[in-house]
Image (cartoon, helix red, strand yellow):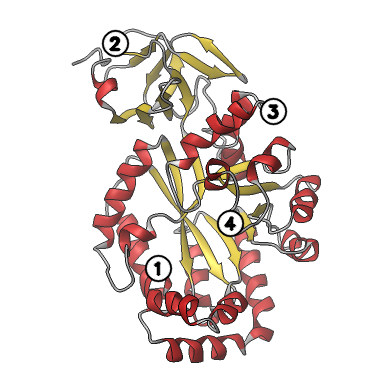
Amino acid sequence: MPGITITGGRVLQDNDLRETDIGIAGGLITEAQGGRHFDATGLLVLPGIVDIHGDAFERQIQPRPGVAFDIGFALAETERQLLGCGITTAYHGITLSWEPGLRSIEGWRALLAALGARSWTCDMRVHMRWEAFNLEALDEALADIAAGRVHMVAFNDHTAAILKKLSHPIEGAKYAGRAGMQLPAFRELAERIARRGQEVPAALDRIAALCRAKGLPMASHDDSTVAMRQEFSARGAAICEFPITEEVGIFARAEGDAVVMGSPNVVRGGSHLGWASAADLAERGICSVLTSDYFYPCLLAAPFVLAARGKLSFAESWALVSTNPAAAAGLADRGRIAPGLRADLVLVDPVTRDPVATFANGRLAWVSAQGSVRLGWI
């Protein structure tokens, strides 16, 4: 396949936007060359977005309780959304829970099978969100990690929070509906699961030991106290996802760990749960990574929102969705624009902030109507 040259754009390199041309050949970024060209005049040429925690795909699979679609069909639509949002690497946050239904062991198996059934343009990876009390699935989870079917593990423990919400009929119905159960039966199940708490630490230790042996990145999720964060840090989890308190985030960053917050928090102007402001924590150097969390478009929008606030440069803001998450996931081949790195790029109109084209692994993976007229080979 002939090489591609992207001409006339302002390229984000070495923490600065500079007008220059870059090339693509063999799936990698190169110096500008001949061959086909894409006219990027007036556009920003940015590193492709690396999303290390996104679960919006769940709403493609089950848009309403009791309404499910074929998982392969849902993932294909998810990929279109990802590429249209400039996301070229996506870690799907697949929850492996004791809950029946969407987050069950059957759902886990079906998702892994669908991801492995075809090749994808977006680099779609598996972020196992391990529910701490899901002891019956432990051996299968360990087998999948050992077999290389998992690329990141996050330690979740939502059991106590679920039990608390089950006392409220409306909130409880949401969980029961997702599981496809009546509320009394779901409450009985949750109470039975919670009684095995003394077995949980040993299970977490087994998963963490295998992840360390395999070199997999690990995250703790929703840490509420410094002590909780220390517990998971001791297991080797160098990523702190969505710390509930500012104190936890400050501690994690002081330890050199990545602190992850959701980009919807930035775009909406605050947390929907009333937790810390991701924008404020990013500006203070506490939040180092932004993720899509539950809404993919926010990852593209958030850096522009942060830059407009005036405390972070655009380059610093974009690093939160590219360079920093790539580093946290141990991906040295992407997240920046430099010769020899993977050619994952998103071209953006700086006025409208709309994506114009996305290149994934050197391929033109998505293009807007504006972008189509800029193609030198059409």
Question: Which amino acid type is marked by label 3?
Answer: Lys
Q: Is residue 316 above or below residue 290?
A: above
Q: Residues within 10 Å of mark 3 (few under 14, many from 20)?
A: some
Disc 4 designates what residue? Answer: 214
Q: Name the residue type under label 1.
A: Trp
**SS category of the residue bearing label 2:** loop
Determine the CA span between mark 4 and mark 2. Answer: 41 Å
Q: Amino acid at mark 4?
A: Lys
In the rendered image, residue 310, in percent from the top left (x then y), is placed at 66, 25
- Would you name the residue on which mark 2 appears? 35
Separation of disc 1 and disc 3 at Cα?
41 Å
| Amino acid tagged 2 | Gly
As displayed, is residue 343 above or below residue 90? above
Mark 4 in CB contact with mark 2 (< 8 angstroms): no
Residue denoted by label 1: 108
According to the image, label 3 marks what residue? 311
Give the mark, 1 or 3, whose residue is nearer the N terminus.
Answer: 1
Cα separation between marks 4 and 1: 21 Å
Quadrant, the C terminus? top left
From the viewer's side, name the closer residue of 211 and 135: 135
What's the residue at 47%, 41% (across, down)? 298
Circle 4: element type: helix
